[in-house]
Image (cartoon, rainbow, N blue to C red):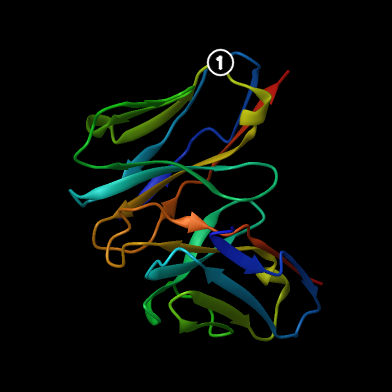
Amino acid sequence: AQKVTQAQTEISVVEKEDVTLDCVYETRDTTYYLFWYKQPPSGELVFLIRRNSFDEQNEISGRYSWNFQKSTSSFNFTITASQVVDSAVYFCALSEYDTDKLIFGTGTRLQVFP
Amino acid sequence: DTAVSQTPKYLVTQMGNDKSIKCEQNLGHDTMYWYKQDSKKFLKIMFSYNNKELIINETVPNRFSPKSPDKAHLNLHINSLELGDSAVYFCASSQEGQALNTEAFFGQGTRLTVV
């Protein structure tokens, strides 16, 4: 069965701190895709990254980085030097190759205080 | 230009009413979706359509009926609204039909409140 677990319901940090959002997934497929989406207070869902199961290279995009480890079924997201504008709910999601849907985790609310 | 647009953004209505939410995408994508986000922020797929054909129906009550007049539009009609239908409904689209190996673009959401 497909499942995505984001154990951290809410995280609060002070600006400039680094923060890591955890994501653990379950799937029986060998081909699957992992995603992170950001939902700011305005409510829209913003795509951040997509990873396929054959690409375990870590990725860095500015202050954002992602650590994909198949051995632990994890796809963690780190924000370096957090800013107030990073305050949002972050969703990790999984899609198996032969399905056409995103399975979302329950989200982690990140609050960055000045 | 908005890639995936939904109307209305807010919808307040009484129990028992019938309402529709419209969605349009100008990305040329083949696949469109409806997701529901409940009060606890949990996001779950409801339907997906590929080139106007229903692909996924995730055990959604019959009161919910998606309609896709063409591949750029996927509307959601809800009959006999219930209090539990209150949620934010997101429309989305993606390029790939059979495998979501490309990003899904989401609309801004429609906040439905049933009173």
Q: Residue at x 56, y 49 (%)?
A: A45
Residue drawn at x 43%, y 77% as measured from the top left = B71
Which of the 4 image quarters holds residue A10?
A: top right
x 69%, y 86%: residue: B80
Q: Is residue A57 left or right of residue B1?
A: left
Secondary structure, mark 1, is: loop
Figure check: B11 above or below A114: below
Q: Is residue B113 left or right of residue B75?
A: right
Residue that carries the numbered disc 1 in the rendered image: A81
In front of the other: A99 or A85: A85
Q: Residues within 10 Å of mark 1 (few under 14, many from 20)?
A: few
Name above or below for residue B103 compared with residue A87: below
- Residue B115 seen by the camera: yes
Q: Position of residue A70 (x, y in %)?
A: 24, 34
Vertical side of B57 occupied by B87: above or below: above
Q: Residue furthest front?
A: B1
Q: Quadrant of the C terminus of chain B?
A: bottom right
Residue A2, visible in the rendered structure: no
Of A37 and A107, nearer the camera is: A37
Q: Which chain's residue wears label 1?
A: A
